[in-house]
Image (cartoon, rainbow, N blue to C red):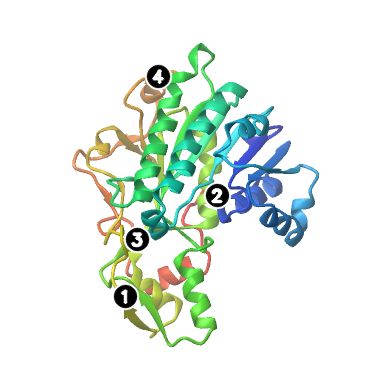
């Protein structure tokens, strides 16, 4: 599956985060990658990552301090890099509502810096991670990710006759077990002996994908991407209340109310995006509305089929929506939702 990474240098922004460190492990264990560069701004997290897992003492690993707000530092880091996985972001919804300028600087201006540096340095491929909150955004975080996505898609038109870098997006929902997410928070409360768990609304639904599943999906997309597509994995969605039941049967739930910027249900593909969306066995692909890198020939050659004209991929109407506590428990326990 990861054979296309052979002899490649891969840089991961936000490399010390949950996704970045897991993706780096996957590359080091299952590919013949030439070099993995962990790009992040926190020296302490880099030290922890290196010391807590002997795998990161592998001679193929490099730790590079820097901030995606700094284009000059990115340009230095991207030297002789073939593939960039952009996972760095500020992402806490409530924090974005009260610190909007900081989210714009990282999520929007940072995206501009990455596209510019990648073009200047001749990177081959860039995959940027996105979120369901970028679709019809209600909160500032989602709005910054929508801007970021637009910047990466549009960057494909800036590369000229050279034809690269190619920029594509991977969009998915909540990641089970990622740092700062709901499950680790709940588990910590239970560890402290709490007899109930806070929940915002009993009607709330969300898309979920395992951490390993998200990493494997990005690895697969880095092979099939042509540029300017948005790839969405086929993943389950559940009621948040059922997630709590799967984690701790019979647990009492305290309804605390929806936080600023939150939705009851999330959307991964909107009705308007359905016009250019096709699907395979494991993902949906929102194709570019303009031709880049021979994308018209790519569209003609693909075996993926168009979705229905009225298609919408929402967490409450998702074809893979489940209320089975057994299935949800398997997901909570780490089963991948992405089979490749």
In the drawing, does residue 298 fall left or right of residue 188?
Answer: left
- Image quadrant holding the N terminus, namely top right
In the drawing, does residue 71 fall left or right of residue 276?
Answer: right
The CA span between labels 2 and 4 is: 28 Å
Secondary structure beneath dot 3 equals strand
Of all residues shown, which one is farthest toward the top? 161
Of all residues shown, which one is farthest toward the left? 310
Q: Quadrant of residue 49?
A: bottom right
For disc 3, the marked residue is 206
User: Can see residue 90?
Assistant: yes
User: Can see residue 32?
Assistant: no
In the image, is residue 120 above or below residue 214?
A: above
Dot 4: within a 10 Å radius of its alpha carbon, few (fewer than 14), some, or many (20 or more) residues?
few
The CA span between labels 3 and 4 is: 36 Å
In the drawing, does residue 45 fall left or right of residue 304?
Answer: right
Q: Nearer the viewer, residue 147 or 266?
A: 147
For disc 4, the marked residue is 297
Q: Of the residues under marks 3 and 4, which one precedes in the sequence?
A: 3
Q: Which mark is residue 215?
A: 2
For disc 1, the marked residue is 256
Of marks 2 and 1, the one in the foreground: 1
């Amino acid at each position: 599956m990861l054979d296309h990474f052979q002899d490649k240098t891969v840089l991961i922004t936000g490399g010390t985060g949950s996704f970045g460190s897991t993706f780096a492990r996957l590359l080091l264990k299952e590919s013949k990658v030439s070099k993995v560069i962990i790009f992040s701004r926190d020296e302490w997290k880099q030290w922890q990552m290196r010391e807590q897992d002997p795998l990161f003492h592998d001679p193929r690993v490099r730790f590079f301090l820097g901030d995606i707000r700094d284009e000059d530092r990115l340009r230095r880091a991207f030297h002789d890099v073939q593939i960039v996985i952009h996972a760095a972001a500020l992402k806490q919804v409530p924090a974005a509502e009260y610190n909007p300028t900081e989210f714009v600087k990282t999520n929007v201006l940072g995206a501009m810096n990455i596209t510019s540096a990648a073009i200047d340095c001749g990177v081959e491929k860039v995959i940027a991670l996105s979120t369901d909150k970028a679709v019809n955004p209600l909160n500032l975080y989602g709005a910054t990710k929508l801007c970021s996505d637009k910047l990466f898609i549009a960057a494909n038109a800036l590369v000229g006759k050279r034809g690269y870098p190619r920029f594509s997006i991977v969009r998915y929902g909540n990641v089970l077990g990622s740092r700062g997410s709901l499950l680790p928070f709940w588990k910590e409360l239970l560890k402290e002996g709490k007899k109930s768990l806070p929940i915002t609304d009993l009607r709330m639904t969300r898309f979920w994908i395992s951490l390993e599943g998200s990493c494997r999906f990005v690895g697969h997309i880095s092979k099939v991407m042509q540029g300017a597509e948005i790839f969405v994995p086929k993943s389950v969605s559940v009621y948040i209340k059922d997630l709590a039941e799967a984690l701790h049967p019979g647990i009492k739930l305290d309804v605390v109310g929806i936080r600023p910027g939150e939705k009851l249900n999330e959307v991964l593909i909107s009705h308007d995006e359905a016009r250019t969306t096709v699907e395979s066995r494991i993902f949906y692909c929102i194709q570019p509305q303009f031709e880049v890198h021979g994308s018209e020939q790519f569209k003609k050659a693909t075996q993926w089929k168009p979705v229905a004209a009225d298609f919408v991929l929402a967490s409450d109407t998702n074809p893979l929506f489940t209320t089975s506590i057994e299935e949800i428990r398997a997901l909570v326990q780490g089963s991948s939702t992405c089979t490749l």
